[in-house]
């Protein structure tokens, strides 16, 4: 069976991840045998599995040169710059809970990268099995600085300056530097004991000892480290952000009546069943209202929206109702995340991850007019984009008579005539290059059409 090493798995000398068929496996090198054997024999791995903190694995083979384990496969890996504020908080809190649990069992996290966490079955989960090491008495938490750069930094920047800062790690894969973080934060942040200690003073000493090339006496008892973790946990748990966004509470503004609204829900479910699908992606899915109709028949529903508040509302519903099949992510169709990192192969693009997931269907409800008229994207290019998502597409087309379309056209002012191409005929013609029309239905009491399309 052909195996393929994951190009993002190269930083850790303890091992690497590879794909074999439809399975995810990890090679452990001899340098990590002692830790792995202790983590396994002590039951600590099992403890993490039981708490659903760490992705499960099982041992496949073992010899003197390598140990191979097979991990449970996560269907869609998501990154920190695709999380809402609450998701980011929960990822940070999970990291702190794991470190605290480590200390209770004489282990420690040797790194605290936000990329070690992804969202799966409604919750954050840790995915780097080799991040654990032995705790050394009175040693500080070596991953502490990384935790500040990857978690606390982006969260407090978001608190003060808005949710664009949740995307910090897309620009700074290693995390924002302590010095820059301290400079960016407002003066009032010095009044917070947590931020003063964990960012401003930390940045000051980090810079001092980096330039002086001196060894710092970093003795820190386990009790002091637990106190540090508890302080960070309480501070992050109480963080909030108050920022209105364009599509927040979108479904309170819809411009068709309840009968049309219900028809759209019913048609969506009937379409999903008709294509015999198991999974799909909902592009511009807002808070997941329509894809949520499929939660009992789908194994995975990725709901992608540009609005972090809408994604947050979706995530809160998932937590409340324990909806394991729905995965909410922040994604901008007009600027989907790219390949980042070394050789552009360390963090994978949104489109590549969707394609690799081999999804059955794609929903695009009430989004094409925004792509076309707000984003100035021709039908030919949006059709190409949707053809990469899945073989089946259910797309809603608001005609020129729709009030939202009229609003968007009027906003173009003197350039309104440049969008004369926006009509049903041109839409069907351009999409015909990539799709065939399976079904076309007008939504009663509205100026909108539903198209069930199949990729050619």
Image: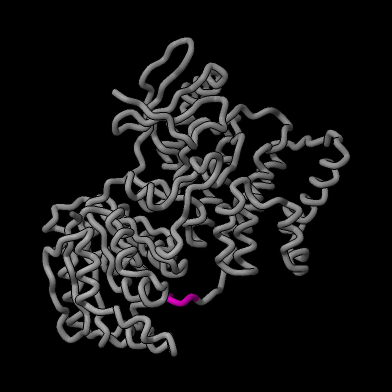
- Residue toward you, 99 or 208: 208
**Residue 19 visible in the picture:** yes
Q: Is residue 185 left or right of residue 283?
A: right
**Residue 103 visible in the picture:** no
Q: From the image, which quarter does the C terminus lie in?
A: bottom left
Q: Is residue 229 magenta?
A: no
Q: Position of residue 200 (x, y in %)?
A: 77, 56
Q: How is the image coloured?
A: one colour
**Residue at image location 88% in from the left, 39% down from the top:** 212
Q: Is residue 3 left or right of residue 361?
A: right
Q: Position of residue 345 (x, y in %)?
A: 49, 40
The vertical placement of 405 against 38, above or below, is: below
**Residue at image location 55% in from the left, 47% down from the top:** 114
**Residue at image location 70% in from the left, 51% down from the top:** 177
**Residue at image location 55% in from the left, 43% down from the top:** 341
Q: Position of residue 234 (x, y in %)?
A: 61, 56
The vertical placement of 215 against 31, above or below, is: below
- Residue toward you, 414 or 157: 414
- Residue extent of the magenta highlight: 245-249
Q: Is residue 248 magenta?
A: yes
Q: Is residue 62 left or right of residue 355?
A: right
Q: Main secondary structure of the magenta part?
A: loop
């Amino acid at each position: 069976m052909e195996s393929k090493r994951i190009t993002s798995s190269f930083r850790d000398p303890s091992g690497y991840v590879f794909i074999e068929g439809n399975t995810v496996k990890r090679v452990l090198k001899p340098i990590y045998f002692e830790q792995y054997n202790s983590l396994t024999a002590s039951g600590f791995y099992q403890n993490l599995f039981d708490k659903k903190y760490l992705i499960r694995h099982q041992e496949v083979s073992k010899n003197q040169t390598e140990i191979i384990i097979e991990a449970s496969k996560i269907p869609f890996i998501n990154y920190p710059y695709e999380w809402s504020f609450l998701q980011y908080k929960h990822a940070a809190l999970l990291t702190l809970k794991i470190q605290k649990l480590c200390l209770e069992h004489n282990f420690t996290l040797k790194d605290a990268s936000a990329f070690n966490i992804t969202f799966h079955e409604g919750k954050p989960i840790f995915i780097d099995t080799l991040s654990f090491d032995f705790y050394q008495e009175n040693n500080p938490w070596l991953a502490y600085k990384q935790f500040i750069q990857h978690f606390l930094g982006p969260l407090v920047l978001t608190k003060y300056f808005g949710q664009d800062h949740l995307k910090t790690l897309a620009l700074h894969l290693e995390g924002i530097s302590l010095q820059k973080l301290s400079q960016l934060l407002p003066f009032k942040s010095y009044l917070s004991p947590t931020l003063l200690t964990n960012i401003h003073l930390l940045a000051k000493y980090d810079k001092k000892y980096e330039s002086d090339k001196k060894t710092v006496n970093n003795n820190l008892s386990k009790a002091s480290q637990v106190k540090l973790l508890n302080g960070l946990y309480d501070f992050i748990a109480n963080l909030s952000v108050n920022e209105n966004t364009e599509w927040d509470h979108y479904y309170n503004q819809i411009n068709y009546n309840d009968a049309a609204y219900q028809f759209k829900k019913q048609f969506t479910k009937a379409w999903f069943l008709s294509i015999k699908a198991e999974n799909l992606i909902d592009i511009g899915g807002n808070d997941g209202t329509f894809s949520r109709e499929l939660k009992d028949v789908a194994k995975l529903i990725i709901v992608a929206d540009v609005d972090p508040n809408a994604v947050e509302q979706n995530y809160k519903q998932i937590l409340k109702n324990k909806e394991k099949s729905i995965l909410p992510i922040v994604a901008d169709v007009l600027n989907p995340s790219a390949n980042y990192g070394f050789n552009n192969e360390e963090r994978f693009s949104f489109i590549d991850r969707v394609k690799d997931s081999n999804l059955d269907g794609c929903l695009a409800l009430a989004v094409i007019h925004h792509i076309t008229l707000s984003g100035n994207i021709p039908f030919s290019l949006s059709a190409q984009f949707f053809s990469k998502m899945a073989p089946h597409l259910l797309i809603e087309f608001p005609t020129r008579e729709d009030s939202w379309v009229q609003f968007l056209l009027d906003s173009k002012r003197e350039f309104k005539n440049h969008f004369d191409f926006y009509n049903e005929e041109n839409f069907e013609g351009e999409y015909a290059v990539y799709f065939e029309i399976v079904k076309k239905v007008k939504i009663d009491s509205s100026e909108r059409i539903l198209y069930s399309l199949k990729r050619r």
